[in-house]
Image (spheres, rainbow, N blue to C red):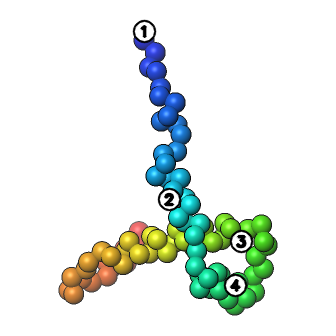
Amino acid sequence: MSAKRTNRSQNKPSRKSKSRRRASRRISGAQLDFIDAAARALELSIEPAWKGAVEANLAATLRLAASFMEFPLPDEAEPAPIFRA
């Protein structure tokens, strides 16, 4: 029986993913203002320790939304009907 050797570098995050994480942490002043305004509107308090996580989540959400907006849809596209079981 031969045991498979695993490459330790496979378990480490790639440089690309590290830079992607850093990029998701960069957020504009307008987005920070949006977070503060949304928290006030929803009567939520965001503890300073959680502010970075909220910023990262918003950056990831905006990045995903941009990828959906880039997808071309034909003018005749219709929403899917609602299926119920």
Q: Quadrant of the C terminus?
A: bottom left
Quarter of the image holding residue 44? bottom right
Q: Amino acid at mark 2?
A: Arg
Residue 5, horizontal then vertical, whole percent:
46, 21
Where residue 64 appears, x then y in whole percent? 45, 70
Which residue is tagged 2? 20
Give the residue type at disc 4.
Asp
Q: CA distance from mark 2 to mark 3?
A: 19 Å
Counting labels gives 4
User: Earlier along the polypeptide chain: callout 2 or callout 4?
Assistant: 2
What amino acid does circle 1 point to? Met
Q: Residues within 10 Å of mark 3 (few under 14, many from 20)?
A: some
- The residue wearing badge 1 is 1
Residue mark closest to the camera, 1 vs 3: 3
* Residue 74 numbered mark, or none: none
| Residue at disc 2, secondary structure | helix
Mark 4 lies on residue: 36
Distance Cα–Cα, label 2 vs label 4: 24 Å
Q: Spatial distance from mark 1 to mark 3, Cα to Cα? A: 52 Å
> Is residue 34 rendered to the left or right of residue 44?
left
Vertical arrangement, residue 49 with respect to residue 11, above or below: below
**Residues under labels 1 and 2: Cα distance?**
40 Å
The residue located at (57%, 70%) in the rendering is 26
**Residue 24 percent coordinates (x, y):** 54, 66
Residue found at x 53% / y 64%: 23
Q: Badge 2: few (under 14), some or many (20 or more) residues near its Cα, within 10 Å?
A: few
Residue denoted by label 3? 51
